[in-house]
Structure formats: structure tokens, C-alpha cells
Amino acid sequence: MRAQEKKIKEFIGGLDKVFIIPPFQRHYVWDEKNCLELWDDLINSMNTSVAHYLGNIIYYPSKESGAAYTELILVDGQQRLTTILLILAAIRDTTTDENLKNDINNKYLKNDVRNEKYRIRLKAGLEDNESFENIIDGNLDSLNDSNLFTNYNLFLAKLTTSNINHQKLFDAIANCDIVDINLQPDDNLLLVQTVFEKINSTGKELTAGDLIRNLLLTSNSVEIQNIFYSEYWVKIEDNIGVDKIPEFIYDYLLIKLSPHRFKKTDVYDRFKECLKNKDLSKKEVLAELLMYSKHYKYLVEKEICPNEKIAKNIREIIMLKATDLNALLLLLFNEMYQRQETELEKIVSLLADFILRYRFVKDYSGGGALQSVVGQIINKLIKEEITYNYNDILFELSNSGTKDGEFPSNERFKERLATKVFTNDEAKVLLNRIEYYNNRDVRIDYGNLTLEHIMPKTLSEEWKEYLGMNDEEAMEFHSNYVYNIGNMTLLSGSWNSSFSNSLYDNKRIHYVQNQFKVTREVGSEYSIWNKESIEKRNSYLAEKSILSTIGPLARTRPYTKDNRKTSPSGQYFLTEDIKTEKTKITKLFYGEKEIECTTWYNLLPTVAKIALSVDADKFNEIIEKNLICKATGVKVSAANNCTLTSDPLISKRPDLLQDARLIENTDYYFERVISSAMARKHTLKLINEMGFSEDDFIIEIE
């Protein structure tokens, strides 16, 4: 590496340079604010004769450089350098000084050469190059709405509406200081990637996807960079979307590194290790990623799977927020979609049934236990201990290593449905399953589906009167039953929402004419709507749910023995199967941030405080619904003006808690009397209800 101070005119000028912005770099993103800040700095430099410091420009030579021209591949500074050249183009196009015009054009913007490859001194990124060349060539009839043209026009306006001396401004630009850093990596391109990582720690943060792209595309050959970018990376991004790259790589690595798991925030570091340890070429990895991306696009619905039955089940898995299944689904698609589509169809349907039961029965979304189940199946498939068929997958799901990961039985599923608080998407999926079971020919578009709460979410005075209850009784009944599956049904998107708060007698007229059997049955079988009606329908739907979803086989393999009462010291995902007895928390991490928490009883209020800061409305709704509560109802039954049936663990009313402690800087109280196991269980419940990622929280115990 060589670093030296230079004037920008020395760096850009000369007769033998072409600057290349590689295809994996961000396109030109400077906006008006960035440009005006630089403009003001240059004007100040012009007026004070004090050189402006432009910062570092980092690059390395391409191995394709010839005797006449050196290709310099830019690593950092491309946004500033591009903007300086835009200002120079604007000066050239507004000055009346022909000598200045020619100097700018021939020494800083263009090379005097017939070879098109070297004619313009800066080769912008693939998305920007045409616009940049039009500006440099003066093809202003080709104006578009790109940032390049917008900023060029901004500088034109500045120059034409002021009395700025063009020569003095040019001199101020030419006098700008930079640090010229030539990485001189030869064939050691890890040096270039290390620089990207260092830049990431100080500048605008790059995503894991950005860093992985740079790692795969960095080359000392511009030609190879362009091939890798256009033949592989662009197609991968087109298949799944730029924003999905990190989670795609995460799921890809879960396959490659199976059965080992890791934090999603570590995806870049693990990818680097994988690339090194697997001894694969960049081209091989890009080809494999492209192959996987052709199927991953179905899992993120960038494109709907042509197989309608598979597409329906994928939609349901997405609605149930079951991203833990994606790595397994990706492997199954890759191995089976072209050769065993019918068998794949059966397996995807099985996984949708499994995750529906699993999500509904567990107090939280599964986390470590579910990831362990998925990881073990992936590992056995890769090692060829099981085959890619429905029966083997069903057997593995039915014989999980731990109780936390087991496939819920009919009895547990039915029991849970009686008390579960359903979200809209959960209810849509379950009711759709029942509807599809009733009529296999029905095709339901979830996008055109409305979830109806028969007793509305907002209880009017008319509804209280209809129920024959006073305010307190009605609110207690409403709180306990409004989000019960028995109180929910399906309507088409054409349903007039003005009926949503109507009394049952009015709704019933419309229900009996509805296209869905599950809704017509409400109108035809229930003349009134009350507690008995909801409980009766809930039991009916529970029976139908068992019939409409596949359950587990009888267990034939014992749980993996784990006689430990205490987990070893170390860091764990909060969702892992941690043995909490005789342990204490030493650290809690939310993402990359360490949060003070050193006792199990403080875990729930600490996470609650984070949840409140992230989404106060959602947190308030969770607490109002009393979703974080004990199984007992001792305190609430003795309290005045309380409609709850279970003792809360978090509340604004300290009288509803056995040992109430204030959550610092909030108006909420938490229950101090709680075991370590229950603290973890209810914290996981809160994490799930808030929609946090499975690996957002890590604890360190000893």
C-alpha cells in the first residue's frame, strides 16, 4: 500500500489514466444537500485561498492496464470524484474562456484517444455510465431524472445565476487536497476487501449483502468484474430483490454449514469463512447462489410459484412468519422441483401443516427448538441419512429431539385453539384450511380476503345491549372472546366494511349469502351470537382444524437425553432450550448493543422496555389484551373494576401484581415474583408478539 498527499489536479490530470467505478459499488447517490455542502466548501476555498481537503481516494490498478493507459479501480471516494467532474463539466459548459474550456475537456474529462474504452476519464458504474458519458459529451438532449443530471443542472444553475469567476473556481478545485492511496494488492485481493470493511466502520454503513457482493466481485480484472456482475449478481438480485440478499445468504449458509447455527448479524463473517474453508472459487459460489435464487424467489414471493398448490402453502408459511423453514424449503426446492414436483408439493403442504400447529400451540414462535428440528432434517438430507420424500420428513417431524420441538398432537392442538388469541393472518390461514377441506375446488386469493370479527373489535353501546350485559360484564366478555377463532370468519374483499360494526341480526343476513361455507354456516346455524355460540363454534372449528391439517405419527424414537438441570456457561440465543436452574444472567444483547440485565426476574421488564421504545402502540395493545400473563387469576378476581381473568405480569395497575415493581422511565409495572424458567418463557412470548427476529436477543449466563 502506498499513500501520499496530492492535489486533485495531479490525481485526475495527466495523459495516462482512466478511473473505473466497479459494477459492485453503489451507484451515484449524492443528493442536493451533499452537492451544496461541497459547493460551499469550494466557494470558501476560492475566496480565502485556503485549499479544501477532499479526503482519501482509495484505488488499485487493474491488471488489464496497458503501456499507454493505467486503469485505476476505485474503492473509496467515487462519489466525491464523480461530483468534482460534474462541476468541471458545468464550468466547461458555461465559461466563455476557450482556453479554460479546452483545458478542462482535454486534461480532466477526456483523453485524446480513439479507443472508446479510454476516451472518457471516468467509467461510472453500469447504471450511471450512459448518463455520465452524455454529460461529458455534451449530449444534453438526453437529459433524464438521474442524480447525475440533476446535480449537473444544479451546478449549471449556480454558475449561470451568479458572478462567479470561472477560472478562480477552477483553480480552487484544482488546488483541493486529497490523500492518494494506492492499495497495490497484486493478487492479494483480501487487502481490498479489508479496506471495504474498514470503510464500513466509519462511513455510510454497508449491509451484509453489500459486503458479500464486494467480496465475490472484487477482482483485479475489470472484465471479470463485469462478467461476474452481469452474468450472476444482477440476476440474483433480480430473482429475489436486493433487500432479501442477507437473509438469502443466511439460509444458503444454514444448508452449507448444517447443522451449525449462527446469528443473522454474523452472516458476512460466516460467509467469508465458508468461502475460505470450502475451497470454492468465486465463480462456483456465484453459480450456486444463482441456482438457489431461482427457487428462493418463490419463498419470498418475488415471483409466485407456478405450481398453485405449492404457492398457496408458501403464502401461508409467510403469513405465519415461519422464516425458520426457509433453509429447508430452499434445499427441497433445489433438489426436487425439477425432478419430483408432486412429492415436493406433498412435503411443502406437510411443512405448512406442521408450522400452523407449531405456531398455534407454542407460547412463542419456536426459535432455537424449531431451528434445531429444521437443522437436523437438513443435516440428515445432506448426509443421505434420510431421503427426499414425504414419509421420511413426516417421521423426522414426528420424532423431534426435544419436547420443545415436537409436532403438536391433535389433543394439544385442539386444547390450544380454545384459548388462543388469534392475529388476523393466523385466523385467515386456519379458516382457509377449513374452507379448503370443505371444498377442495375452491381457490382463495389471500389478497382478496377479509377477516371478519363477528362480535366487532370495538364494542358499541348497541352491542352491549344486544349481549344483555352491563358495561363491566360486556367488556370482560369482549376481552376474553373477541380474538377467539370462534368469533372470526372469512369474507371476500367486496364485503362492505360498513357492516363490520353492525349487530349480529344484520350481519347474519349477509353471512348466509356468502361465498364461503365456513361463513354461511354461521348465519344458518346460529340465531343469536353470545358466549355459548362462540364456544360452540370454537369447538366445531377445532374439530375441523384437526381434520384439515396433518398431525404427527406416533413417536417411535425417544427424546434426546439431556439430564442437565443447568446449561453450561456461555452465550445463547434467548430462543434456545436453556436450562435456567442455578444460573444467572451476566449479559443481555439486543442486536449488537449490550443491555444491562443481570437477573432472570429483570429479563421480562428489560425486554418490555425495549419493546416499548420500538413500537409503543403494539406493546400497549399486547398489554391491554393481557397476552403476557400467568395461568392463575387470584389477584384479578379480588381486584375492583377489573375485567381480566388471568393475573398479568405487566400492567399499569400495581394492585393486579403480587410484588409490583415499576419499569424504569415508564408507567408500567412488572411482577417481581417469577421463576427463571417462567421469566424466559414469558419474555419469549413478548418477543414473539412484538414480531422481533428470533436472534435479536442473546443472553450470556453462568
Image: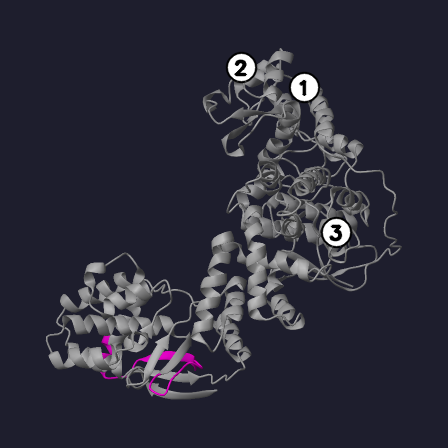
Q: How far apart in space, not on screen, are marks 3 and 1 (Cα)?
A: 43 Å
Amino acid type, mark 1: Lys
In this picture, residue 637 sits left or right of residue 447? right
Note whether 95 is above or below 324 in the view shown: below
In this picture, residue 580 sits left or right of residue 69? right
Is residue 52 highlighted in magenta?
Answer: yes
Which secondary structure lies at badge 3?
Answer: helix
Identify the residue position indicated by label 1 in the image.
531
Q: How far apart in space, not on screen, are marks 2 and 1 (Cα)?
A: 24 Å
Question: Residue 639: where, in percent of width, then height?
Answer: 70, 31
Q: Quadrant of the C terminus?
A: bottom right
Q: Which mark is residue 513?
A: 2
Q: How many marks?
A: 3
Other-residue count near label 3 (Cα within 10 Å), few / some / many at <14 / 14–19 / ≥20? many
The residue range painted magenta reads 43-69
Which secondary structure lies at badge 1?
Answer: helix
